[in-house]
Image (cartoon, rainbow, N blue to C red):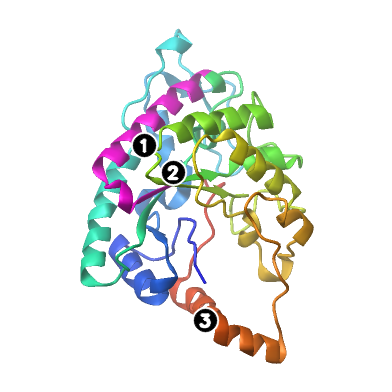
């Protein structure tokens, strides 16, 4: 059994995360994130001070704020030509380079398996800009930010050996829009499935083919609740299949928001799940005598899940704290 961690981990330091997760999950890991400690704990809110300090942006004079955290929405500053907008370093590459040193040290100590990859979790540009900018100016700001994010990916891939690296796009705000339920959190300008897949094709092209690429389909987490609870897996299946067609390189994994649901509510529909390209129809969990035989044949999955729950205190991704 393999274990995938989507990003945020409720421990206090990168060193503690690599030590605890490595020793607990060890052989079940193919990749490991740094836990998004410090200012990245609030996911894309990490980027709000950068946007707020930009000379090209200002708080919208209308006084519009985000529904969740009440941050003032941003628009183009007075007199700014949209073509002028540009961003420098976003901070993700610097964070990744520092955490990679801790990753290497943990691997040398034997806390992590030799073949595990370092997983760098990045928000999509749309996930950042559609959260904090007004619908009126969102396209101009998003175009400039997308270029800056592509440069962050390039810096990460120059600094970290490709055989050690996995880049994960966190596909949250797009998933909430595409789910089709009513929402007032994000603009819907150029937010059709086709528009969003074109964005995913562009940003994924920045990831070299020998670097592992993953996508996390997420419904956010504000105050320990999804922004919208998924009603079924249909929208996720549609998005996953569209992504498989749009992205012109291998995708190593697409963990879905169903994994974020409380166990009592996580009912996977086999017919829907089977429609995801490359995914097998999930089997019913064996019980009683069959379950014991299953555990003997397939390892200690129950013990691993218990340790994850009690020792790691893994938090859900703070998708809408952003």
Q: Where is residue 200? Give x, y as percent.
A: 54, 34
Return the mark for residue 122.
2
Residue, x 72% and y 45% (percent of image)?
235
Is tag 2's residue or tag 3's residue first in the polypeptide sequence? 2
Q: Nearer the viewer, residue 198 or 129?
A: 198
* Number of numbered discs visible in the structure rendering: 3
| C-beta proximity under 8 Å, tags 2 and 1 | yes
| Above or below for 200 versus 229 | above
- Look at the numbered disc 1 and give the secondary structure of its residue: helix
| Mark toward the start of the polypeptide (2 vs 1) | 2
Dot 1 alpha-carbon crowd within 10 angstroms: few under 14, some 14 to 19, many 20 or more: many
Where disc 2 sits, the SS reads strand
Location of residue 300 in the rendering, given as x and y in whole percent from the top left corner: 51, 82
> Can residue 269 be seen from the camera position used here?
no
Q: Nearer the viewer, residue 316 or 77?
A: 316
Residue 48: give x, y in percent of width and height.
Answer: 44, 36
As for residue 159 lying within the magenta part, the answer is: yes
**Which is more N-terminal, label 1 or label 3?**
1
Distance between the alpha carbons at the discs numbered 3 and 1: 37 Å
The alpha-carbon separation of the residues under discs 2 and 1 comes to 9 Å
The x, y position of residue 149, in whole percent, is 40, 32
- State whether the magenta stretch is mostly helix, strand or loop: helix
Which residue matches tag 1? 153
Residue corresponding to mark 3: 299
Mark 2 or mark 3: which is in front? 3
Question: Are the residues flagged by discs 3 and 1 in contact, CB closer than 8 Å?
Answer: no
| Residues at circles 2 and 3 in contact by the CB criterion of under 8 Å | no
Q: Which residues are magenta?
A: 140-167
Q: Residue at x 56, y 31 (%)?
A: 130
């Amino acid at each position: 059994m393999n274990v995938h961690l989507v990003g945020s981990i409720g421990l206090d330091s990168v060193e503690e995360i690599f030590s605890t997760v490595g020793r607990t999950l060890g052989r079940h890991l193919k990749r490991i994130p740094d836990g998004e400690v410090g200012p990245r704990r609030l996911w894309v809110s990490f980027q709000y001070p950068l946007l707020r300090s930009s000379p090209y942006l200002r708080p919208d004079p209308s006084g519009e704020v985000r529904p969740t955290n009440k941050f003032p929405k941003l628009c183009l500053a007075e007199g700014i030509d949209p073509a002028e907008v540009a961003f420098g370093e976003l901070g993700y590459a610097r964070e990744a380079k520092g955490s990679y040193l801790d990753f290497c040290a943990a691997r040398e100590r034997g806390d992590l398996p030799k073949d595990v990859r370092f997983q760098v979790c990045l928000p999509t540009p749309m996930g950042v800009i559609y959260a904090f900018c007004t619908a009126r100016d969102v396209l101009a700001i998003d175009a400039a930010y997308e270029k800056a994010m592509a440069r962050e990916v390039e810096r990460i891939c120059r600094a970290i050996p490709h055989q050690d690296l996995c880049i994960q796009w966190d596909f949250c705000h797009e998933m909430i829009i595409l789910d089709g339920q009513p929402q007032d959190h994000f603009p819907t300008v150029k937010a059709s499935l086709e528009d969003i897949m074109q964005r995913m094709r562009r940003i994924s092209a920045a990831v070299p083919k020998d670097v592992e690429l993953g996508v996390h389909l997420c419904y956010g987490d504000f105050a320990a609740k999804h922004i919208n609870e998924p009603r079924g897996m249909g929208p996720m299946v549609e998005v996953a299949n569209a992504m498989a067609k749009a992205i012109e390189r291998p995708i190593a994994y697409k963990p879905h928001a169903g994994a974020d649901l409380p166990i009592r509510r996580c009912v996977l529909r086999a017919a829907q799940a089977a429609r995801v390209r490359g995914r097998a129809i999930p089997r019913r969990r064996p019980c009683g005598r069959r379950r014991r035989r299953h555990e003997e044949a397939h390892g200690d999955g129950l013990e691993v899940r218990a340790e994850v729950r009690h020792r790691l205190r893994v938090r859900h991704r703070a998708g809408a704290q952003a």
